[in-house]
Each structure stands twice: as structure tokens, then as C-alpha cells.
Amino acid sequence: MTDRGFPSEQIDTSRPHPARMYDYYLGGRDNYEVDREAAQRVIDFLPDIIPAARANRDFLERAVRYLVDGGVRQIIDIGTGIPTSPNTHEIAHSISPDVRVAYVDNDPIVATHAGARLTGSGGNTGFFLADVRKPESILDHPTLGDLIDFGQPVVLMLVAVLHFIKDDEDPAGIVAALRDALPAGSHLVLSHATADFHAASLPEVFKVYNKATATLNTRPYDEVRALFDGFELLDPGLVQVPMWRPASTPDPEEVKRIGFYGAVARKV
């Protein structure tokens, strides 16, 4: 199921898009020249963006595997990370093909890629266009209603999304609105960029993102932690993403390079 919801003339390839820049950081090919130029400027100012993007993607994979292994069978992934592979549904379906995944994004180009990525997913995966700044547009969407049973636990994924929400757009209020729709036993998977480790490099990075379709808004540890209000953090709590249940002990020098916090939490 794919609902594009936007006319083709609304697709803007004249400005870099953060999702396609992220794809470039990860070595993907689903991006445009304008995205590559912007992403390369970020890399020039902040080379650590490449290991940070990879570590964030690895965190997503570990979190999905952990929760699906634990029995969760419904996932809402907002800010999908499509087209970069492996996607959430690919990870989940490698464990259990009956997991239902609803993808949400606000980029019409992502919708085009989603149509190709979701072919052969057996009807357990859907995509629709909506903006996380308007949680009701997500919760009331028919595609979500077709896939997700809010009488059963759900995983809500907000991976590398909320740092594109400005303070005056109330990121905590957005999470709260989505949280209140979830039944007890649901989980939140969230990661967020921070300036706690790269403050000197970020002014130039901000300038690049200010010319993109979404600005970058890093937040310190305490502000990211506050986004989990109403949830109970699972061990090891909110940490730099390589430290969340790694398969092996990360190199401390490598961890210092990662400007992302992440955690998985349960609604009680």
C-alpha cells in the first residue's frame, strides 16, 4: 500500500533534502546532485557525520531486531530513512514476515522510492505522506488504520527525525500526542542529533542545512531525555547510539565521534 498524496509538481529537487543527504552519508545512490553537494559540504566541516550516520542506522537495526525478537508485530516508522537499505520492514521481516509496518514521510520523492521498496512485502507494509508536525494527520490516516491495531502494542519509531523540528514547533508535544494514541506495552525508538560533542564544527553545518528543505536543530542530553516523558527507558537508557546494546564493546575513541543520542522506551 502506497499513498503518495502529493502532485508531482510539489517534488522539489532544487534544494537539498535531509533524507537524501543522509543517504549520501551512508554511501547510497538515491540522491541528487544538489543533495550530494550539500552533504559533501557538511562532511568537509564535520567528517564525523559519516560514522555518526552509520552508527545511527546500526542503532535502528539493533532496536528493530530486539523488539521484533521480543514479540512486537506492529511498527509505525516516521521519517522512514527510505531509500537507504536495509529498511525497517526488511529488518523486521527477516525475523517475522507477519510484522506490519506503516511508513510515514513528508517527502514526495520518498514516496516514489517507497513504491519500489515495498513491492513484494506481502501487504504487511504501507506508506503514506504526512507531516510529523501534525500528528493528527498521521493518526487519522486510513493507511495507518488499515495496518495498525491500536488495541495491541505498537513500536513508534522517530529515528533521526525530531532534530528537524524547531523548538517553536514543540517536539515534546508532538511525541506526547503520538504517545497518547499508543496502548500500554508499546515502545518508542528515538534518536536525535546533539552538539554535545561537536560544538565547534556545527555553526557551518547549520548554515548548510538552513538552505535545505528542513533546518537542523541539535539538542543537549537533558532536552532529548525529556522527549521520553511518559515512557520507561529500557537499559542502558539514553546513550550515544553505539552504546545501545552493541554486539561487541565499541572503541571509546570511535564513540566520541558520534553526535547522536538514542534509546528505546516502553509505555507503561
Image (tube, rainbow, N blue to C red):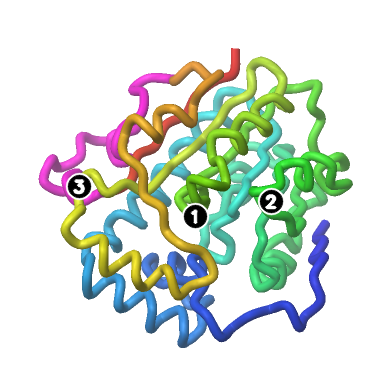
Magenta highlight on residue 70: no
Residue at image coords 41%, 81%: 36
Q: Residue farthest to the left?
A: 253
Q: Which residue matches tag 1?
A: 164
Question: Who is closer to the viewer here, 193 or 233?
Answer: 193
Question: Element under label 2?
Answer: strand
In this rendering, position of residue 38 left or right of residue 104: left
Question: Where is 146 relative to 35, above or below?
Answer: above
Please provide percent x and percent y for residue 258: 25, 49
Question: Element under label 1?
Answer: helix
Inter-mark Cα distance, 2 to 1: 18 Å
Please provide percent x and percent y for residue 129: 74, 59
Name the chief secondary structure element in magenta: loop
Question: Who is closer to the viewer here, 135 or 231?
Answer: 135
Inter-mark Cα distance, 2 to 3: 31 Å
Are dots 2 and 3 in contact, CB under 8 Å? no
Please provide percent x and percent y for residue 182: 70, 25
Q: Residue farthest to the front?
A: 168
Q: Which mark is residue 197?
A: 3
Q: Which residue matches tag 2?
A: 103
**Over which residues does the magenta segment extend?**
234-258
Instruction: Count neighbours of disc 1 (C-alpha within 10 A) and say few if under 14, some if 14 to 19, many if 20 or more.
Output: some
Question: Who is closer to the viewer here, 194 or 25?
Answer: 194
Residue at image coords 52%, 56%: 86
Q: Amino acid at mark 1?
A: Phe
Question: Element under label 3?
Answer: loop
Q: Quadrant of the C terminus?
A: top right
Q: Give the image quarter of residue 92.
A: top right
Please provide percent x and percent y for residue 158: 54, 43
Q: Which mark is residue 125?
A: none
